[in-house]
């Protein structure tokens, strides 16, 4: 799993998204029990500070998830949220190659979330009944996020020939 800020050129080319999270089935830990979801938070996704604004998100599945040895494993869902509400931005979007997978999720609701206290962004992968997420051997995608930091660009980037204060 890789979370990274986008360059200024990428931000302008990607509709104002500022960060990207790439993930795949390889990020799923081994030995997950049946009926158990897995969550990635601290260490994978950023914490948000008070006054940060998560303006918008978008999920894209490059390759839907699947277990090549078990065609009956036909449902797993992805959610993106925070420690308060795990589904705040993306709510249980079908990510399994079952004919109903959702390749692009562009949520309309729950955007422009202004954090009044620090929090942790969280990505959750949910499994279907009687199946283990550890058995998935295909699947990858990415999530684009537009995060306006409490410390704006002018405060974190020094201007040329200045003391950094603008």
Image: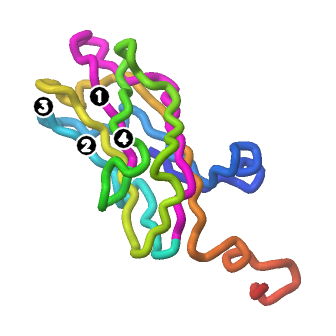
Query: Which mark, by number, is residue 38?
Result: 2
Q: 119 or 134: nearer the eye?
A: 119
Which mark is nearer the camera, 1 or 3? Answer: 1
The Cα atoms of the two marked residues, 1 and 3, are separated by: 12 Å
Left or right position of 84 against 117: left
Mark 4 vs 2, N-terminal side: 2
Q: Position of residue 148 (x, y in %)?
A: 60, 64
User: Which residue reaches farthest right?
Assistant: 161
The residue carrying pointer 4 sits among few (fewer than 14), some (14 to 19) or many (20 or more) residues within 10 Å by Cα, namely some
Query: What span is colored magenta in the figure?
Result: 52-80
Residue at 65% across, 52% down: 6
Q: In this view, does 120 lie above or below 111?
A: below
- Circles 1 and 3 in contact, beta carbons < 8 Å: no
Which mark is nearer the camera, 1 or 4? Answer: 4
Q: Quadrant of the N terminus?
A: top left
The residue carrying pointer 1 sits among few (fewer than 14), some (14 to 19) or many (20 or more) residues within 10 Å by Cα, namely many
Query: Can you identify the residue that label 4 sits on?
Result: 91
Left or right position of 1 against 98: right
The Cα atoms of the two marked residues, 1 and 4, are separated by: 12 Å
Which mark is nearer the camera, 4 or 3? Answer: 4
* Residue 25 location, quadrant: top left
Q: Is label 4 in a helix, a strand or a loop?
A: strand
Query: Which mark, by number, is residue 34?
Result: 3
Mark 1 vs 3, N-terminal side: 3
Mark 4 vs 3, N-terminal side: 3
Query: Can you identify the residue that label 1 sits on?
Result: 76
């Amino acid at each position: 799993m890789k979370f990274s800020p986008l360059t200024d050129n990428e931000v302008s080319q990607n509709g104002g998204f500022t960060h990207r999270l790439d993930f795949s089935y390889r990020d799923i830990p081994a030995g997950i029990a049946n009926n158990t979801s897995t969550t990635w938070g601290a260490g994978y996704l950023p914490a948000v500070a008070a006054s940060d604004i998560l303006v918008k998100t978008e999920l894209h599945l490059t390759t839907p998830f699947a277990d090549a040895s078990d065609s009956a494993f036909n449902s797993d869902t992805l959610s993106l949220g925070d420690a308060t509400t795990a589904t705040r931005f993306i709510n249980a979007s079908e990510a399994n190659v079952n004919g109903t997978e959702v390749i692009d999720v562009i949520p309309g609701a729950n955007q422009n979330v202004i954090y009044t206290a620090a929090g942790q962004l969280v990505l959750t992968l949910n499994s279907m009944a009687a199946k283990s997420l550890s058995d998935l051997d295909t699947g990858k995608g990415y999530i684009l996020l537009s995060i306006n930091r409490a410390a704006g660009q002018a405060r974190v980037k020094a201007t040329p020939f200045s003391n950094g204060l603008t």
